[in-house]
Amino acid sequence: MLTLPIFLATLGYALLGILIFIVSFVLVDKLTPGELWREIIERKNLAVALLAGAVAIGISNIIAAAVHG
């Protein structure tokens, strides 16, 4: 059975990971030329969508490794 401190620590790390992911993905979006979401949504650019997905997975793996220890 999870105790309250363990649950709160888990929740805190999860929220921290999500926040770091959002900030880093927005940073990647700003560093790439053009508008990432316009390319994906309006122009249906599959290559940009695959790039964004790969970046998201890479950032997630880095954050998970950092949070896990």
Image (cartoon, rainbow, N blue to C red):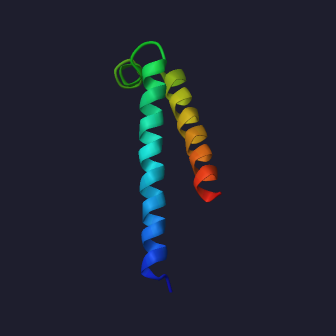
- From the top left corner, tell me how far across and down residue 27 is, in percent: 45, 28
Which quadrant of the figure contains the C terminus?
bottom right
Residue at the image position 47 percent from the left and 42 percent from the top = 21
- From the top left corner, tell me how far across and down residue 63 is, in percent: 57, 47
Residue reaching furthest to the top: 33
Residue at the image position 42 percent from the left and 21 percent from the top = 30
Residue at the image position 55 percent from the left and 29 percent from the top = 50
Residue 45 to residue 15: above or below: above
Residue at the image position 45 percent from the left and 76 percent from the top = 5
For the residue pair 14 and 46, the one nearer the viewer reads as 14
Give the quarter of the image for residue 7. Answer: bottom left
Residue 37 to residue 15: above or below: above
Give the quarter of the image for residue 15. Answer: bottom left
Residue 20 to residue 35: above or below: below
Residue reaching furthest to the bottom: 1
For the residue pair 50 and 24, the one nearer the viewer reads as 24
For the residue pair 58 and 65, the one nearer the viewer reads as 65
- From the top left corner, tell me how far across and down residue 52 is, in percent: 51, 30
**Relative side of 31 to 63, left or right:** left
Q: How many marks?
A: 0
Residue reaching furthest to the front: 5
